[in-house]
Image: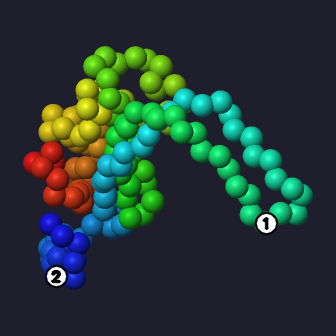
Amino acid sequence: QAFNKHNVTRFFNILKDVQEKQFHPAHRVFNVDETGLMTVQSKSSKILALKGRRQVGTLTSAERGQLSTFVVCMSAGGYFIPPFVIFPRLRMKAELQDGAPPGTMVVCHPSGWMQSEIFLQWFEHFLTHAKPSASDPVLLILDGHSTHA
């Protein structure tokens, strides 16, 4: 739905109702979203500038990379669920996880985009790290994208 005053007000009214029925402390209220990042292998860059110069320009490579999807989730209290990355390829290679933060989950799909079945994998990843229980529930806020159904 559109980002407008009516929908934002509606969202916060629903959130208020949920919090009044069952309070969730900030560290148990999570938000998740995906973002696409272009991945381009490059050598380490060097920036040269005159000493004392306040503005420094950089050159950006015209090389095109592939769009990968990064799923990021954190609580209002600052707790991060390890990243979940979707690479646009058919088969997984162990090297895709090189240098990733501990706990990062990497999957592959030809499009590199979120799909319903991949969302279920992410949700299991979330449950593993958030560890919700009847005595310590979590509130997960996500957008209304069709892959989250």
Q: Nearer the viewer, residue 13 or 33?
A: 33
Above or below, 18 relative to 36? below
Q: Quadrant of the N terminus?
A: bottom left
Residue 54 has which mark?
Answer: 1
Tell me the element at label 1: loop
At 68% from the left and 50% from the top, the residue drawn is 58
For the residues bearing labels 2 and 1, Cβ distance under 8 angstroms:
no
Q: Nearer the viewer, residue 143 or 73?
A: 143
**Crowd class of label 2 (few under 14; some 14 to 19; many from 20; radius 10 Å):** few
Residue 112 has which mark?
Answer: none
Tell me the element at label 2: helix
Q: Of the residues under marks 2 and 1, which one precedes in the sequence?
A: 2
Above or below, 20 relative to 29? below
Residue 6 has which mark?
Answer: 2
At 44% from the left and 24% from the top, the residue drawn is 96
How far is the residue under mark 2 from the one under mark 1? Answer: 43 Å
**Crowd class of label 1 (few under 14; some 14 to 19; many from 20; radius 10 Å):** few
Across and down, in percent, residue 144 comes to 16, 58
- Closer to the observer: label 2 or label 1? 1
Q: Is residue 129 left or right of residue 118?
A: right
At 80% from the left and 47% from the top, the residue drawn is 48
Q: Nearer the viewer, residue 23 or 61?
A: 61
Across and down, in percent, residue 85 comes to 36, 36
Res. 29 visible in picture: yes
Q: Nearer the viewer, residue 31 or 62?
A: 62
In this view, which residue lies farthest toward the front?
A: 62
Three-letter code for the amino acid on which mark 2 is drawn: His
Above or below, 124 relative to 134? above
At 30% from the left and 34% from the top, the residue drawn is 112
Residue 71 lies in what quarter of the image? Answer: top left
Res. 13 visible in picture: no
Across and down, in percent, residue 49 comes to 82, 53
